[in-house]
Amino acid sequence: MEVFHQPLEICLTCIFWIYHKICYIWFNPVALGDLHNLTHFNVSYNLLSGAIPSIESITKFEPSAFFHNSGLCGAPLEVSCSASATTGKGKPKLSASAIVAIVAAALILTGVCLITIINMKARRRRRREDEAFVVESMPLVSTDSNVIIGKLVLFSKTLPSKYEDWETGTKALLHKESLIGGGTIGSVYRTSFEGGVSIAVKKLETLGRIRNQDEFEHEIGRLGSLQHPNLVALQGYYWSSSMQLILSEFVPNGNLYENLHGLSYPGTGTGAGNPELTWPRRFQIAVGTARPLMYLHHDCKPPVLHLNVKSTNILLDTNYEVKLTEYGLSRFLPLLDNYGLTKFHNAVGYVAPELAQSNRLSDKCDVYSFGVILLELVTGRKPVESSVANEVVVLYEYVRGIIERGAASDCFDRSLRGFAENELIQVMKLGLICTSEIPSRRPSMAEVVQVLESIRNGLGS
């Protein structure tokens, strides 16, 4: 490492020294007086202008050393500087040597910047390679007991870094007993290692628009660089020609859908919601979902679209803090045709109309889905339900109709206690704005976060 950096540092030092000297002499002609041992000096034919410095080491040379510089005046020339000023001949001009000096300085400075940028990128790349744990020939036992050899790359230092640990931990990695869920692009498994470390492993069932290993690794590397406290941390990946896995942190408290609708909790009966999901916690979940979406849309360059925001992708830790998952995976979604994505079969009610009808992608698609989440949190209802008469009830249409009749409180989840009615109404209205049919009428996620913060501080209206 030192062999690489030392010559570069010496090179940069030399460049800065030369650049400093050129600028110092050009902008400070008096500095020529420091050249005490000057024996040869000639600046003729350079279109120089101004007064020749009254320095013995310069004025000792013959007038021929200054010929054909019509703007120069003073000794040893016979041209008086006062006379030159009177006739206008002393008007300052850029000489050819000055232009050359400026261009040279600019080129040197540009070279310094380029070398610095290249060096910084090389250091970042080497640092990522040093931090990543890579096993090029990692055996993995699949569900059909076939051994697959592939490449394992880990981004997290909290995971085991010994080959033996992974060889043991992955033997039962994709068994049915380890299955904890399914998603749009694959199934999710849980694997544990000695010491209590657990990770979630998504087995991709399609590569979508990803065509080869280089594209896959580039996309995963981009997602692995995203960091936000409310995003599920991407911890690595596994690649082989027949199997691709995405490794991420395991979030222990299930997802929002399960906590609102789908599991049996002690003392509640089958299928009841989690009684611990109070309104303050639900509001915390709303803010905790909005912030990472704002980060993806506004802080990432280029912006990252989620395009699959739904309650099953909002994971909750033991403190009911949000961990948003499946972000930025749109390139892994299966193709509808050569120009668009498939409709989300298991996300009925969350998909923005422009995405479902014409595959028009924008950040406003995520805003629409988030609006449905807000309505889901307030009402405790699913995005789409069947009525007693077997009619399909779409949540945002149901809420809009009741609010227009002036009976907003009829929408509230009956299991909620100890809440401020006005706060729930404001959150519902924000949800309806986010689910506007016309994308341009929806707010940005940055604006959504501002509104939620104002509601929490009692300033909303």
Image: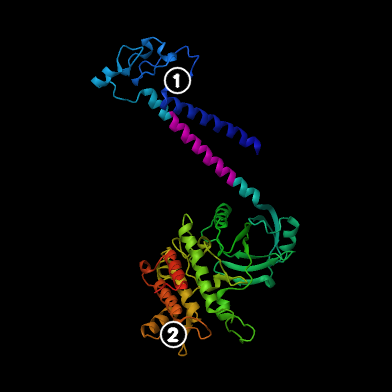
Q: Is residue 197 visible?
A: yes
Decide if residue 194 is on the left or right side of residue 18: right
Viewer-nearest residue: 149 or 435: 435
Q: Which residue is drawn at 44% across and 65% down?
A: 445
Location of residue 393 in the rendering, given as x and y in whole percent from the top left corner: 44, 83
Q: Is residue 64 above or below residue 183?
A: above
Location of residue 122 in the rendering, given as x and y in whole percent from the top left corner: 58, 43
What residue is disc 2 on?
Answer: 409
Q: What residue type is labelled 1?
A: Leu
Viewer-nearest residue: 43 or 292: 43
Q: In this view, does 325 lie above or below 214?
A: below
Q: Quadrant of residue 246?
A: bottom right
Tell me how the rendering is colored.
rainbow
* Region of the chain picked out in magenta, as a range: 104-124
Q: Quadrant of residue 119?
A: top right
Q: Can residue 334 be seen in this view?
A: no
Q: Residue at x 55, y 70 (%)?
A: 313
Location of residue 372 in the rendering, given as x and y in whole percent from the top left corner: 46, 74
Viewer-nearest residue: 403 or 167: 403
Q: In which quarter of the image is the C terminus?
A: bottom left
Helix, strand or loop at label 1? It is helix
Helix, strand or loop at label 2? It is helix
Mark 2 closeness class: few <14, some 14–19, many ≥20 residues within 10 Å = some
Q: Quadrant of residue 79?
A: top left
Q: Tell me the number on the disc at residue 32.
A: 1
Q: Nearer the viewer, mark 2 or mark 1?
A: 1
Q: What residue type is labelled 2?
A: Ser
Report, in whole angstroms, how far the alpha carbon at label 2 lies from the one at label 1: 86 Å
Which residue ends up furthest to the left in the rendered image? 87
